[in-house]
Amino acid sequence: MSDLSDIITSKVRVKIIEYFLSDISDMHHVRGIVREIKEEINAVRRELDRLEKAGLLKKEPRGNRLYYWIRNDYLLYGDLLAIVAKSTGLGKEILDNHKKIGKVSYIMFSGRFVRRMKRRKDGEVDILIVGDVVLPELAALVRKEESKRNHEINYTVMSREEFDFRKKRRDPFLLGILSGSRVMILGDEEGLVG
């Protein structure tokens, strides 16, 4: 499977980008980053400096610590977020096991789910899967991610026929899912919403 290391040669930079984009809500200090990604402090500092100069990260000194956080106004932010969603966590698990899961046409994560933001309302769907799905295989992967995130993941599975029928009928439930921000994990976005 493809991931960031296919296009970025520095493994430390890849780990830092994945670390920041897998949980975009927090600020991180240098030693905490070193602990989490298990790399040498000088290599981490060097890559943090490069990413800050490139505009992906912001930094701020607080006391004797230097804190970094991701800039969501970075030009390639959404693209990097999509790559990380596919190459880490549940996205990676689903793609690595997609043949066990069944014959899947589309897998879409909501933008709020990828950004680890709370749902706006009850019943909001985190993941939409379209195709012939082996539910126990999918459920096992989702349960594993739920235990990591420490909260329930709300996912919806539809056969291709049901999806096409609902889309044609402009079903409010499906349109609500498709109207939000999304990251395509599998399949073409144009085919999903077009």
Image (cartoon, grey):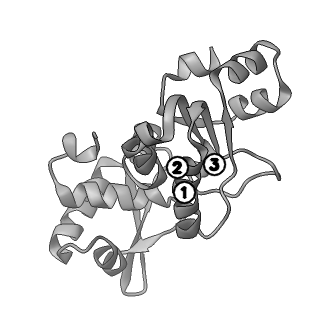
**Residue at label 3?**
112
Q: Is residue 160 above or below residue 59?
A: above
**Which residue position holds label 2?**
137
**Residue of label 1:** 140
Crowdedness of circle 3 by 10 Å Cα count: few (<14), some, many (20+)? some
Q: Is mark 2 on a helix, strand or loop?
A: helix
Query: Disc 3 or disc 2, which is closer to the eye?
Result: 2
Q: Residue at the spot x=23%, y=69% of the render?
A: 45
Question: What whole-number distance in Å separates the C-alpha atoms at marks 1 and 3?
Answer: 22 Å
- Badge 3 marks a residue whose secondary structure is helix
Report the amino acid beneath label 1. Ala
Q: For marks 2 and 1, give the CA distance.
A: 5 Å
The answer to whether 62 is drawn above or below residue 136 in the figure is below
| Left or right of 144 in this view: 118 | right
- Is 151 or 18 nearer to us in this picture? 151
Q: What residue type is labelled 3?
A: Arg
Marks 2,1: beta carbons within 8 A:
yes
At horizontal 65% and vertical 55% (from top left) the residue drawn is 153
Residue 34 screen position, x and y as percent:
28, 76
Q: In this view, does 66 lie to the left or right of 1?
A: right
Residue 52 on image: x %, y %: 32, 56
Q: Considering the image in quadrants, where does the C terminus appear?
A: top right
Residue 44 left/right relative to 100: left
Task: Choose top left, top right, bottom left or bottom right for residue 2.
Answer: top left
CA–CA distance in space, label 3 to label 2: 24 Å
Left or right of 117, for residue 70: left
Q: What element carries label 1?
A: helix
The crowd level at tag 2 (other Cα within 10 Å; few <14, some 14-19, many 20+) is some
Disc 3 to disc 2: CB gap under 8 Å: no
Residue 171 rendering spot, x and y as whole percentages:
83, 23
Contact between marks 1 and 3 (CB within 8 A): the answer is no
